């Protein structure tokens, strides 16, 4: 049993905005230090960024308006320098930027299938949606599409339940969204003590999660790891190598904002 939400779900909108700000930081520096939290809803977007890079406020507002598709949204943006003690941890070399626990788990058939189905539905109906797949049911809650339209479009061997409460409109005018509130959707059965989004690559919540997830898919085995702030090595590998592997992965996804759309699968 697994749940997946699409990029227009309010929590994913928040993740995407956080990712866009990290992308902006990487435009300014090769290895910025940044952590972004976003709370959005009802035409207001609150953002706090702890950052080593001063972000351009106009570019931040442009990113929010582009992702939300709302020109009249109010952007409340606060940026502050990273804590000097945390910054000192990596002043001379890339070392683990935080404490964490991580478990990468190979994807099941249902998890791969719901990822495919969610993308297929979103391509035709690019609006807020949430989907659940069990061994015998596929539950679809898709906004801005009639139940009859969806019945014609969605086929499968499982029992299909569509919009059980009826047709609806969604998005941030209906519900609020916050960063890293949909980790189940992003990671399937993988586990983390932190969140994937709104952080630079020095943060283990980004790089070690990506590393553990990829290794689990490659080996077909569960991968369990932990780290402490300042670690230079994890899983027998230099932390800097894990960061570079994650950098390549993010590049393949198209950046941090694109990565936030669907998470790890």
Image (cartoon, rainbow, N blue to C red):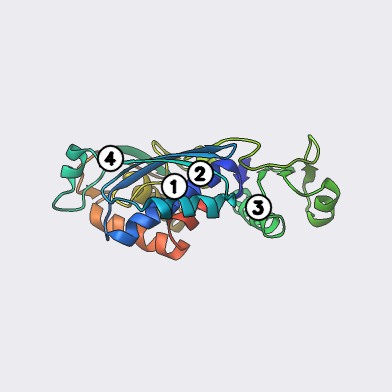
- Judging by the rendered image, the residue that carries numbered circle 4 is 98
Which is closer to the viewer, label 2 or label 4? 2
Which is closer to the viewer, label 2 or label 3? 2
User: Which element type, helix, strand or loop, lies under badge 1?
Assistant: helix
Q: CA distance from mark 4 to mark 3?
A: 33 Å
Q: CA distance from mark 1 to mark 2?
A: 6 Å
Please state the horizontal and vertical placement of residue 250, each as a whole percent of the image. 41, 59
User: Which element type, helix, strand or loop, lies under badge 2?
Assistant: helix
User: Which element type, helix, strand or loop, lies under badge 3?
Assistant: helix
148 or 222, which lies in front? 148
Q: CA distance from mark 2 to mark 3?
A: 19 Å
First of labels 4, 3 by sequence position: 4
Q: Residue at x 71, y 55 (%)?
A: 125
Please state the horizontal and vertical placement of residue 248, each as a whole percent of the image. 37, 63
User: Which element type, helix, strand or loop, lies under badge 4?
Assistant: loop
Task: Tell me if residue 200 comes above or below residue 253 in the rendering.
Answer: above
Q: Mark 4, residues whose alpha carbon is within 10 Å: few (<14), some, or many (≥20)?
A: some
- Residue 166 tag number: none
Q: Residue 126 occupies which quadrant of the picture?
A: bottom right
Please state the horizontal and vertical placement of residue 118, each as a whole percent of the image. 65, 52
First of labels 1, 3 by sequence position: 1
- Judging by the rendered image, the residue that carries numbered circle 1 is 18
Q: CA distance from mark 2 to mark 4?
A: 22 Å
- Judging by the rendered image, the residue that carries numbered circle 3 is 118
| Contact check, label 1 and label 2, Cβ < 8 Å | yes
């Amino acid at each position: 049993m697994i749940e997946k939400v699409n990029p227009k779900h309010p929590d994913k909108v928040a993740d995407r905005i956080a990712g866009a700000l990290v992308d902006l930081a990487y435009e300014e520096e090769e290895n910025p230090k940044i952590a972004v939290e976003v709370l959005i809803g009802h035409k207001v977007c609150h953002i706090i960024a702890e950052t080593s890079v001063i972000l351009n406020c106009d570019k931040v507002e442009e990113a929010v308006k582009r992702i939300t598709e709302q020109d009249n949204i109010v952007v409340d943006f606060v940026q502050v320098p990273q804590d000097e003690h945390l910054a000192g941890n990596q002043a001379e070399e890339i070392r683990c930027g935080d404490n964490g626990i991580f478990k990468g788990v190979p994807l099941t058939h249902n998890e791969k299938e719901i990822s495919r189905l969610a993308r297929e539905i979103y391509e035709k109906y690019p609006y807020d949606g949430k989907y659940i797949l069990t061994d015998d049911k596929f539950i679809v809650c898709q906004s801005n599409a009639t139940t009859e339209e969806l019945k014609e479009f969605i086929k499968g061997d499982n029992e299909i339940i569509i919009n059980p409460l009826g047709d609806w409109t969604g998005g941030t005018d209906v519900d609020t969204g916050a960063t890293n509130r949909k980790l189940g959707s992003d990671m399937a059965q993988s586990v983390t003590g932190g969140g994937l989004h709104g952080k630079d690559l020095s943060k283990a919540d980004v790089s070690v999660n990506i590393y553990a997830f990829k290794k689990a898919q490659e080996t077909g085995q569960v991968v369990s790891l932990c780290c402490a702030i300042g670690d230079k090595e994890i899983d027998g590998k230099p932390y800097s190598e894990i960061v570079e592997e994650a950098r390549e992965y993010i590049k393949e996804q198209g950046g941090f904002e694109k990565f936030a759309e669907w998470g790890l699968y």
